[in-house]
Amino acid sequence: MSRPWFAAWTVGLLGLCGCAATPLERYRTQQPVLDLAQYFNGTIDGWGMFQDRSGEVIKRFHVVIDAKWESRDGHEVGTLDENFAWSDGTRSRRVWTITRVDSGNYVGRADDVVGQARGEAAGNALRWRYVLALPVDGRVWNVAFDDWMFLVDDKIMLNRALMSKFGLRLGEVTLSFARRDK
């Protein structure tokens, strides 16, 4: 491949990638308004799948989330205890600690999250961005997640997360949540 052609191809590809992101502001007027502390409070079931970059479903899962919020140092802090049952028979657990920074911003931590997750909410949408340390074939890969959640009503939320490493798309996770009746 000649250098000028390769340079043009690279610039074009980067331009397409830059246009792919939907701005969160687009959802500001969408209803119902998503309040994490209100939705993730109690027990929530989730059903999902991981697809590789070709679209093939690699794994399916069910997750049960036990969630509660409390006030700490003037901030709302949530604990989301996620218990996964995977289609290959394995089980895993992740415990998130999420802090509401202000009306539309959150930070989160979990044992397998590298650094801190950052979340922004507007209208019915939440965008989480974080790096997850994923075990793959005896090694650990730090994989970037661009995670979008959309509140449908007071019981149902849809979630789609794009996974990448070095800017290359690895796959995606699609998930639906349903709150249990209290």
Image (cartoon, rainbow, N blue to C red):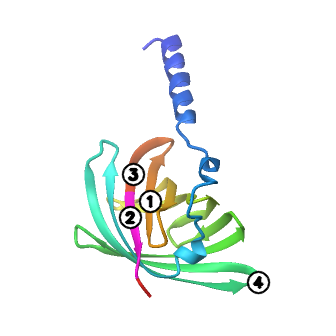
> In the rendered image, which residue does mark 1 sit on?
159
Q: Residue at x 58, y 71 (%)?
A: 36
Q: Residue at x 59, y 52 (%)?
A: 27
> In the rendered image, which residue does mark 4 sit on?
73
What separation in Å lies between label 2 and label 4 (alpha carbons)? 33 Å
Q: Is residue 10 above or below residue 45?
A: above
What separation in Å lies between label 4 and label 1 (alpha carbons)? 30 Å
Task: Count all numbered tags in the image, as a single digit.
Answer: 4
What separation in Å lies between label 3 and label 2 (alpha carbons)? 14 Å
Pinpoint residue 77: horizontal percent, then vertical percent: 64, 79
Q: Residue at x 44, y 73 (%)?
A: 155
Q: Quadrant of residue 129 in the image?
A: bottom right
Q: Which residues are magenta?
A: 174-180
What separation in Å lies between label 4 and label 3 (alpha carbons)? 36 Å
> In the rendered image, which residue does mark 2 sit on?
176
Pinpoint residue 69: horizontal percent, then vertical percent: 60, 83
Of labels 2 and 4, earlier in sequence is 4
Q: Is residue 179 magenta?
A: yes
